[in-house]
């Protein structure tokens, strides 16, 4: 497991979250000023300096539940609110989109290009705020500094860590199904055509060398695909042609996107085990959440500006049906944790973390999605 995976996972999932929210804000005809405020507030929180400092520290990945808690907090960083069913759908779309991108990366290193595509698109969402653009550019600089010198083997370890994180997720997404890149069981279809990874040759030739390194024999074979050579490598600079399209906004065409639970997901034993079995890293996960969420600087709504609820479904009835029909093992009950930016209370927070015990707790209905916001601001 790579300890350098979390920043890439978080930033790419965050990018996908912004793509979905932007599409739904437009689909629900939310006034432009409110939509811009929501996106600006979320991006500002996501790239806050204190938050990114914690994010970029070398650390193991934690459970899907723990990471989901961070995104629940992030999605509610402005005047917008999501019900539990919409938050579940949002997280499903985020995770399946990035899983697809990781699977299709020609080289392990190209996951960095996918991340840069997300950052480029995020900057396009920012309206009239040079400060937030500077925050994103600073994160780009950190990514270049940390990941620019990693070896191919280290990137392969990062890719494997990401695939392990996603391995039990087989949620069907309508866009992927229509494009025939996902099967009805929720598994992705890997292409046998297109450009090969940069620096490699189109398959079809076997070369045999002697002990002196001289080629002594050459054989050709039919590979059954339709491959072409890559015409150039994507740019890893702040401004440049990424070449790779993975990580760009697939919702820009304003297509409605639905998710469906596949039988594989419903019966996933390991997924159920994650929700039921005691987690030996629970205390460490809580400390992780306390650090990350404590680093988020949530802007309190100023003035009488009312909030609004965003629905990721076509109708409220669909949202209610999704909430009732979602399999229990696919539910991401938000981890209840209190965090604060008040440094004087950090010792009190540490004490609460120390006293936390993983005991059976009564089930709670968190359908409204803003319980966490209230709990975090209660200190």
Image: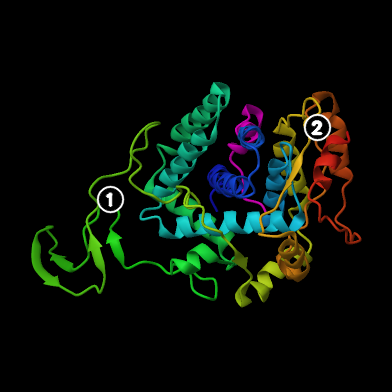
Query: Is residue 52 inside the magenta stretch?
Result: yes
Residue behind mark 2: 340
Q: Which quadrant, please, contains the C terminus?
A: top right
Among the 4 quarters of the image, the one containing residue 10:
top right
218 to the left or right of 365: left
193 to the left or right of 215: right
Please, which colouring scheme is shown? Answer: rainbow
Position in image of residue 214 (x %, y %): 9, 59
How many other residues sit within 10 Å of disc 1, few (<14), some (14-19) or many (≥20)? some
State whether residue 64 is above or below residue 337.
Answer: below
Q: Pick whichever of labels 1 and 2 is earlier in the sequence.
A: 1
Residue at 32 percent of width and 43 percent of height? 234
Residue behind mark 1: 198
How many other residues sit within 10 Å of disc 2, few (<14), some (14-19) or many (≥20)? many
Front-most of residues 119 and 103: 119
Residue at 51 percent of width and 71 percent of height? 187
Q: How many marks?
A: 2
Extreme residue in the right direction = 362
Front-most of residues 295 and 228: 228
Residue at 66 percent of width and 52 percent of height? 62
Position in image of residue 180 (x %, y %): 43, 69
Secondary structure at badge 2 equals loop
Position in image of residue 101 (x %, y %): 46, 55
Front-most of residues 21 and 379: 21
Secondary structure at badge 1 equals loop
Q: What is the magenta range? A: 44-62
Among the 4 quarters of the image, the one containing residue 330:
bottom right
Position in image of residue 262 (x %, y %): 61, 73
Q: Determine which of the numbered discs, if any, sits on residue 302 in the image.
A: none
Pointers 1 and 2 in contact (CB under 8 A)? no
Spatial CA span between label 1 and label 2: 46 Å
Query: Is residue 329 inside the magenta stretch?
Result: no
């Amino acid at each position: 497991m790579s300890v350098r995976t979390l920043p890439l996972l978080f930033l790419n999932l965050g990018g996908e979250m912004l793509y979905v929210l932007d599409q739904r804000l437009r689909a629900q005809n939310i006034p432009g000023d409110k939509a811009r405020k929501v996106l600006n507030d979320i991006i500002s929180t996501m790239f806050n300096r204190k938050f990114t400092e914690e994010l970029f520290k070398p650390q193991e990945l934690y459970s899907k539940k723990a990471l989901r808690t961070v995104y629940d907090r992030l999605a509610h960083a402005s005047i917008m609110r999501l019900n539990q069913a919409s938050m579940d759908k949002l997280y499903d779309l985020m995770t399946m989109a990035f899983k697809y991108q990781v699977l299709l990366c020609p080289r392990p290193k190209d996951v960095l290009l996918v991340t840069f595509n997300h950052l480029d698109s995020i900057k396009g969402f920012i309206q009239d705020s040079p400060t937030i653009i500077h925050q994103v550019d600073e994160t780009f600089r950190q990514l270049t500094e940390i990941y620019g010198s990693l070896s191919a083997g280290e990137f392969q370890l990062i890719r494997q860590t990401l695939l392990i994180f996603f391995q039990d997720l087989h949620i069907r997404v309508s866009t992927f199904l229509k494009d025939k890149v996902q099967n009805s069981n929720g598994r992705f279809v890997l292409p046998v055509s297109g450009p090969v990874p940069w620096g490699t040759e189109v398959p079809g030739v076997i070369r045999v060398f002697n002990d002196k390194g001289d080629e002594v024999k050459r054989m050709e074979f039919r590979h059954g695909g339709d491959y072409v050579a890559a015409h150039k490598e994507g740019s890893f600079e702040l401004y440049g042609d990424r070449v790779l399209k993975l990580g760009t906004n697939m919702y820009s065409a304003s297509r409605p996107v639905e998710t469906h639970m596949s039988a594989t997901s419903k019966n996933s034993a390991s997924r159920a085990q994650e929700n039921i079995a005691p987690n030996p890293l629970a205390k460490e996960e809580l400390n992780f959440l306390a650090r990350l969420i404590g680093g988020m600087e949530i802007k309190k709504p100023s003035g009488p500006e009312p909030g609004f609820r965003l629905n990721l479904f076509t109708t409220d009835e669909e949202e209610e049906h999704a909430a009732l029909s979602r399999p229990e093992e696919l539910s991401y009950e938000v981890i209840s944790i209190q965090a604060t930016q008040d440094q004087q209370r950090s010792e009190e927070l540490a004490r609460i973390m120390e006293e936390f015990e993983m005991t059976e707790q009564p089930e709670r209905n968190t359908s409204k999605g803003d319980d966490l916001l209230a709990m975090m601001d209660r200190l």
